[in-house]
Image: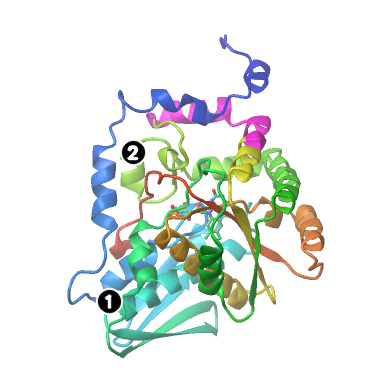
């Protein structure tokens, strides 16, 4: 018989994060994981190959860390193709996040190419399937701050310090995110910021009440560092401040402690600790525009990283359809499909996520 009933656990408001203390110190060691992170997250070496540009592309943000991309290499061109075997059909039934993720990767690739002395021109092609062609031409190398932030960018799912971001930093974030066809609202007014809480909680509650959503999320969780390294994908516990554990124990902890009330409270605290929330909305709802959203968001996240500002996704208001419609109306854009909701602020970094080997994503 269980020592603690599920109701008692809900009542205590415990979350997985509360168990963090048992994760470190004994059982799974993080050394191998950290070594692999350090190996993957490096800037380009001198005279890089196209495969090195692909490695930089794969360090981009991507939904559930599924890495839903394939890369085709030609002499003067790299194409990014969707990997539909890596869809997350419950949380992302129309492949919105999948194409946003491809846009994030394209942006990293273009920045890395520029640093390597290849000017990149990005074109979206829509033949049998939507793909991104990145055409490369010789140019003087340009290694700017966004390029240098590529290995350091992360989704930081912790409490932030509650302090505002300076007007100058806000201006830089806004400039970085600028993209034709995408509007970005930067919400820093505390009252407005807190109104978003209701949408996050409504969306999160609907998702946590859906067993298919919870199962899909669980399938992409990695509780032990050894499994995270072996798979090279998915959401590793430590990256979200949760305890690492042998995988079977991690699954048990997840089932016991992943509870709606505790998760909702976590989001309330996280939002209230943030300096603001950025909402990305494209002019149209199609893969070409979702790729633009990805490019815009990735530049925003890299600029934030360069300034020591963290960010994390709160996309629940854009995922559940009924909540999305109400959220669009609240934004004053009732016809639009809001794309991304991102909180930002200052905080220490968390452990970095891993990627699959480059040769597994080249076709
Ligand atoms: C389109 C998209 C949707 C995402 N949705 C969420 C989300 O709802 N919640 C979350 O915590 N992270 C979300 N993320 C962040 C990814 O989980 C994260 O990028 C991935 O795990 C890799 O980790 P990294 O960003 O630290 O490199 C999203 C990222 C993208 C690009």
Say which label, 1 or 2, has the lower sequence index.
1
Q: Position of residue 156 (x, y in %)?
A: 47, 48
In this view, 336 is above or below 208? below
Which stretch is magenta?
A: 245-265
Q: Taken as a whole, is the magenta stretch helix, strand or loop?
A: helix
Q: Is residue 95 visible?
A: no
Cα gap from disc 1 to disc 2, whole angstroms: 29 Å
Q: Which residue, given by chain and number where applicable, does mark 1 sit on? A: 50
Q: Point out residue 145 in the picture as x, y percentages from the top left corner.
A: 36, 69
**SS label for mark 1:** helix
Which quarter shows the N terminus? top right
In the image, taking residue 159 as reference, residue 186 lies left or right, namely right
- Front-most of residues 345 and 109: 345
> Is residue 140 in sight in this rendering?
yes
- SS under mark 2: helix
Q: Quadrant of residue 288?
A: bottom right
Q: Nearer the viewer, residue 204 or 343?
A: 343
Which residue is at a point 59% across and 12% down the rendered structure image? 4
Quarter holding the C terminus is bottom left
Q: Is 73 inside the magenta-drawn segment? A: no
- In the picture shown, does residue 7 fall above or below 179? above
Q: Position of residue 336 (x, y in %)?
A: 75, 69
Residue at (23% x, 46% y) in the render: 35
Q: What is the basis of the colouring in this image? A: rainbow
Residue at 72% over, 50% down:
196
Of the pair 207 and 154, the residue shown nearer to us: 154
Q: To which residue does mark 2 refer?
A: 225
Apparent side of residue 358 relative to residue 333 in the rendered image (left or right): left
Of all residues, the one furthest to the front in this rendering is 167
Outermost residue to the left: 46
Name the spot of residue 19 as percent of width and height, x first.
47, 25
């Amino acid at each position: 018989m269980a020592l603690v009933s599920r109701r008692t656990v809900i009542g205590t408001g415990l979350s997985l994060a509360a168990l963090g203390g048992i994760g470190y110190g004994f059982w799974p060691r993080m050394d191998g994981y950290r070594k692999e992170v350090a190996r993957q997250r490096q800037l380009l070496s001198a005279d890089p190959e196209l495969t090195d540009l692909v490695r930089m592309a794969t360090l981009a943000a991507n939904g559930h860390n599924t890495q839903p991309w394939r890369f085709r290499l030609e002499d003067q061109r790299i194409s990014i193709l969707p990997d539909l075997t890596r869809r997350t059909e419950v949380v992302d039934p129309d492949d919105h996040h999948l194409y946003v993720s491809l846009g994030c990767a394209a942006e990293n690739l273009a920045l890395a190419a520029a640093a390597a002395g290849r000017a990149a021109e990005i074109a979206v092609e829509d033949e049998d399937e939507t793909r991104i062609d990145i055409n490369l031409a010789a140019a003087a190398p340009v290694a700017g701050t966004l390029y240098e932030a590529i290995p350091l960018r992360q989704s930081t799912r912790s409490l932030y310090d509650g302090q505002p971001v300076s007007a100058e930093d806000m201006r830089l974030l806004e400039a970085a995110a600028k993209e034709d066809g995408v509007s970005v609202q930067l919400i820093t007014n505390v009252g407005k910021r807190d109104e978003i809480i209701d949408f996050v909680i409504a969306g999160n509650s609907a998702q946590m009440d859906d067993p298919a959503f919870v199962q899909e999320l669980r399938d992409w969780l990695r509780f032990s560092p050894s499994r995270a390294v072996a798979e090279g994908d998915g959401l590793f516990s430590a990256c979200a401040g949760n305890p690492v554990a042998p995988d079977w124990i991690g699954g048990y902890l997840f089932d016991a402690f992943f509870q709606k009330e505790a998760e909702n409270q976590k989001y309330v605290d996280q939002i209230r600790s943030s300096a603001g929330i950025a909402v990305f909305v494209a002019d149209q709802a199609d893969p070409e525009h979702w790729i633009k959203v990805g490019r815009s968001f990735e530049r925003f996240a890299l600029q934030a990283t360069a300034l020591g500002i963290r960010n994390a996704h709160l996309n629940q208001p854009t995922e559940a359809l009924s909540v999305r419609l109400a959220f669009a109306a609240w934004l004053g854009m009732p016809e639009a499909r809001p794309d991304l909701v991102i909180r930002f602020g200052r905080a220490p970094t968390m452990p970095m996520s891993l990627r699959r080997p480059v040769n597994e994503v080249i076709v």
